[in-house]
Image (cartoon, coloured by chain):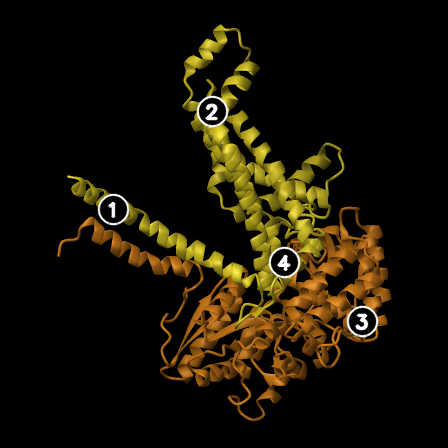
Amino acid sequence: MELDRRHFLTAAGALTLPVVLAGCGFAPSSSGPAESGTDTLTFTTWGTDAELAGFRTAIAAFEKANAGSKVALNSVPYAQMFTNIDAQLQAGNPPDIFRVPYYTFGSYAGRGQLLDLSASMPSGFSDRFTPQAWAAVQNKNKPFGVPHHTDTTVILYNKALLTKAGVTDIPTSLEQAWTWEQFEKVAQQLRKSLPADRYPFAYNWQGNGVTRWLSWLFEVDGRFLADDLVTPAIDSDAGRKAVDFTKSFFANKLVPQNSSVKSTKLAADLWYAQTTAMNFGGAFLIPDAATSLDFEWGATYSPRNIRSAGDFGGNALVATAKTKNPELAAKFLAFMTDAEQMKGFCEGASLLPTRRDLSKDGIMFKVRPELSPVFLGQASTVLPRDSGQVASPSMSKIITVLKDQLEQAFVGGQDTATTIKNISDGIGKATAS
Amino acid sequence: MTSRRSRLNRGESLTGYAFIAPNMVLLTVFVLVPLGWAVVISFQQTNGFGAGRFVGFDNYTRLATDPVFWRSTVNTVLFTVIVTPVSMAIGLGIAVLLNSVLPARGVFRSIMIVPMAISGVATALIGVLVFDQDTGILDKLIRSVGLPAVNWQSGGTAAFASVLIVTLWWRVGFNMLIYLAGLQGINLELYEAARLDGASWWQRFRYLTVPLVGPSSFFLLILNVVYSFQVFDLVFVMTGGGPENATSVLVTYAYDNGFVTGDQGYAAAIGMFLLALSLLFTLVRWRTSRTRDLVE
């Protein structure tokens, strides 16, 4: 057969199309076959190099343990992840499995997009997880995913800058964590010691990280949703205290003005550049910080008030309701939370386990292992009622309310009473719709 | 004879339709159908999954009382009103300069066009590096000459200005290129005649160059306005719409509602408002276009 120009162009177009689609993130771009056979699962995730390496190792182990089964890993940039997932869900061709932050989990579970795992998991399956982790994957008292790992916020500090300011007594146990008053005193001490364009600390509440602001609320034993997860509960003394205290960070120039909740500047970047002496950040920062920072740094516990608290960060793994192979999907989710798999993943990627046994016995990060107890200790302060609120199906709307109102309070000068009222009204509207 | 001509005409028409068919199919599938769909969604309360609930004009009445929406509208209009004439004026100025007998003008032309080759997100990331108020180059320069640093990220007006400056840097090259093409089509004898008549440089520019590049100006006016209404990537990456919504524009606000809050009906209503705004501009342009076409 002769190959004329028209045939050549047609063939070239046909060959190019999958490449273009893969570039858009709509087709698997990494290991494994693209087609979804009965024994093939498609798994979409984003991840750091260490996380993706952890997933690949676990997938290889799963495929070895389940002959004939395949898992096609599709890694996409975080920025594209959920617009792609939403488009695929709407089009009716979602992946079998995907990774989802706990604060987004509720919006998928509440909209009937995830596989109910109640019947698929063996009896007593929930016992392997900490109560706060299991609470984070519930919707109407049914599990719609597995808590794959968690992360929480502690204080990362620049040793030289703290020493220069005379801050040498740094807490080494959860019980000794600075109280709010002590923390404020340390921040003021740093304020006096640092030049005007340098700041004591930055908090990691930018973007969807605004849920981390809730740790301040939990520390004064407050909550933003009542037990029914519908009624707003932030209009309280605890709510006002949390807003007042965090608002004072900006008024007293303890944090950079460009580190508010709607800023595109991340707290970690401010700390890396030594614009701040301390940074509220998660364990996931450790590998990057260990390789790129040229100053000595350590980690200590987040401040406490009535109690210690922390954000239940990290991600769940979920199967989609329309998966063609729910049994294999459930089997894969269970496998990914086996002790061996979870330990390997968390140690390699500097993340925290959600299993009771691993949380109790501890794990050691591959990078800066001596910091592991600080993060594990802080994670133990998360209560099931804290993580349960964040799993609300209305969380994406509540996040928008928190972002709008806290931005107004922090940099717009809005008073605490108005802020609390607006947040409460906004949460009421979000849970009612 | 007549029927043969009619057959020929019909054949030509069919050929014409066949030629435009691929474009019409693409236009229908990727523009008209989604547009119609968006109109339907704008009358619904929907999170994007399952069937939406018909709510009539609720989403539109909500727009009227939403302060962030109005702030975004004002910002979008302000952005358009500033960027369009300024980018065209600078573009024309540079084009005139680079159309003259300037040494190494080829190099300068290339330098001016380079930003066009950079994606919006990459341009915005360059903008972040320059306008970062803690570590950015610009504030370092400002401080080095003894002036107080500008809060490009935490000050509302400064943040808006930073987005404008980066947009101009990105867009001026394109304006210059179109004007340069327009200038090269002008008969040089006209300038020679004007010079003989004693016209000054400014008079030649004002009464010859400006009217004679009218078609280019007309084309650029439309493109600049449309691009300005659609601005998204630069704002999204540089400021995220902050601080305090000072840089929020209609498309970023629609995106936030559609993909962050999951309120796709309301996001579609914002999109419809933007469409109406664009149509209004098109109508005004249509009314004024006849005089512009007469220029040449």
Q: Earlier in the sequence, mark 4 or mark 2?
A: 4
Name the disc covering residue B60, or none.
4
Indicate the secondary structure of the residue bearing disc 4. helix
Q: Is residue B276 visible?
A: yes
Depth order, front residue of B280/A163:
B280
Crowd class of label 1 (few under 14; some 14 to 19; many from 20; radius 10 Å): few
The reply to whether callout 4 and callout 3 are in contact (CB within 8 Å) is no
Q: Which residue is depicted at the point 58% across and 83% down?
A: A143
Quadrant location of the N terminus of chain A?
Answer: bottom left
Instruction: Output the letter for the chain in orange.
Output: A
**Quarter occupied by residue A282:** bottom right
Residue marked by disc 1: B15
Crowd class of label 2 (few under 14; some 14 to 19; many from 20; radius 10 Å): few
Tell me the amino acid under the disc marked 2. Val
Q: Which residue is depicted at the point 84% across and 69% down?
A: A179
Instruction: Determine whether B56 is above or below B185 in the image.
Output: below
Q: Are marks 4 and 2 on the same chain?
A: yes
On what subunit does the disc labeled 1 rest? Answer: B
Give the Cα separation between the discs numbered 3 and 1. 77 Å
The reply to whether callout 4 and callout 1 are in contact (CB within 8 Å) is no
Residue sitting farthest toward the front:
B2
On what subunit does the disc labeled 2 rest? Answer: B
Task: Indicate the position of residue A371 as horizontal and vertical percent values.
Answer: 67, 69
Depth order, front residue of B66/A329:
B66
Residue sitting farthest toward the bottom:
A123
**How many numbered circles does the render carry?**
4
Q: Are marks 2 and 1 on the same chain?
A: yes
Residue marked by disc 2: B295
Task: Indicate the position of residue B254 as horizontal and vertical percent values.
Answer: 59, 56
Task: Indicate the position of residue A319 as horizontal and vertical percent values.
Answer: 50, 78
Give the Cα separation between the discs numbered 4 and 3. 46 Å
